[in-house]
Image: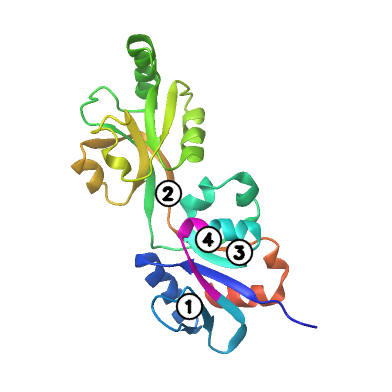
Amino acid sequence: MKKDIINISIVNKGRLKTESENVFKKAKLKILSKSDRSLVASIKGYPLIRVMYMNATEIIEALGTGVCDIGISGKDLWRESDVSIQSKISLVKQYEWGKSDLVVAVSTSWLDCVNPTDLEEISFEFFNKKKRLMRCATKFKNLTNEWMSSRGITQYDLVTSLGATENSVEISKADFITDLSSSGETLRQNNLKVIDDGIILKSSACLFAGKNSLKNKEVKKILKLLIK
C-alpha cells in the first residue's frame, strides 16, 4: 500500500523562517534544500516528508484545506482566519518567539480616550457632529469586529489596511487603528497610544496541525519530535 506524503509548511522568509528551521534542527530533522531560494525541500532520512516554504497566511489556509499536515505560523493569523478554516486546525504548541500583541491604538491627541468606554463615546460624537462613522484601519477585520462587539462599540467602519497601518491616522485614512505591536516603538513614532484594555490578542509563533492529519500515525510521530 502506497504511503501518503506528509506536507510540512514553514514561513519562507525573515526571522520566522530562521526560528522555524531551528525547531527542526533541535528535533534533529535536517532540512535539505537545493538553495536558499528553493520553496520545496525534504528531510534527511524521511523520504515521505515534503517541506514547503510559504507566506505565513498561506500556511494557515493550507492547513485548513488539507494541503498541509503540519505548519508553523502566527496565532494571530489562525485566529483571524475564517471559522471554516480555523476549526479544522489544532494548535499543538505555542512558542516564545515571534511575539506581538494585536492592539487598539488611537492618536495621542485624543487625551480623553483612555479605555473602550471613551472610544464608544467618541464614536457617537463622530456620528452626531461629523455625520459619519468613526473609521478603524486594520488588517484584522474579524478579530477587530469581535473585540468591538465584546466592548459594545457599534458605531464604526473598518478600513482595510494593505500597507503600513500605523500611518493611517496621520494621512487621514482612519481615525484609529488595530495593529500588531511588539515593542510599541512604531506606534509612538506615529503619535499613537494603546488604550487600556486595548490588547485584542497576544500572539506568537505556533506549531499547528490539521485535525484530519492528526489521525495519521506518521504525522503524530513527527509532531512528537518537534515538541520535545
Disc 1 to disc 4: CB gap under 8 Å? no
User: Secondary structure under badge 2?
Assistant: strand
Q: Which mark is nearer the camera, 2 or 1?
A: 1
Q: Which mark is nearer the camera, 3 or 4?
A: 4
Q: Earlier in the sequence, mark 2 or mark 3?
A: 2
Q: Position of residue 48 (x, y in %)?
A: 64, 82
Q: Identity of the amino acid at label 2?
A: Lys
Q: Identity of the amino acid at label 3?
A: Ala
**Which residues are the magenta region?**
51-58
CA–CA distance between discs 2 and 3? Answer: 20 Å
**Residue receiving disc 4:** 59
CA–CA distance between discs 1 and 3? Answer: 15 Å
Q: Which mark is nearer the camera, 1 or 4?
A: 4
- Horizontal side of 142 relative to 172 (left or right) equals right
CA–CA distance between discs 1 and 4? Answer: 17 Å
CA–CA distance between discs 2 and 4? Answer: 19 Å
User: Secondary structure under badge 1?
Assistant: helix
- Look at the image and tell me whether residue 98 can be seen: yes
- Which mark identifies residue 36? none
Disc 3 to disc 4: CB gap under 8 Å? no
**Residue receiving disc 2:** 202
Q: Which mark is nearer the camera, 2 or 4?
A: 4
Can you tell which quarter of the image residue 128 is in? top left
- Which mark identifies residue 24? 1
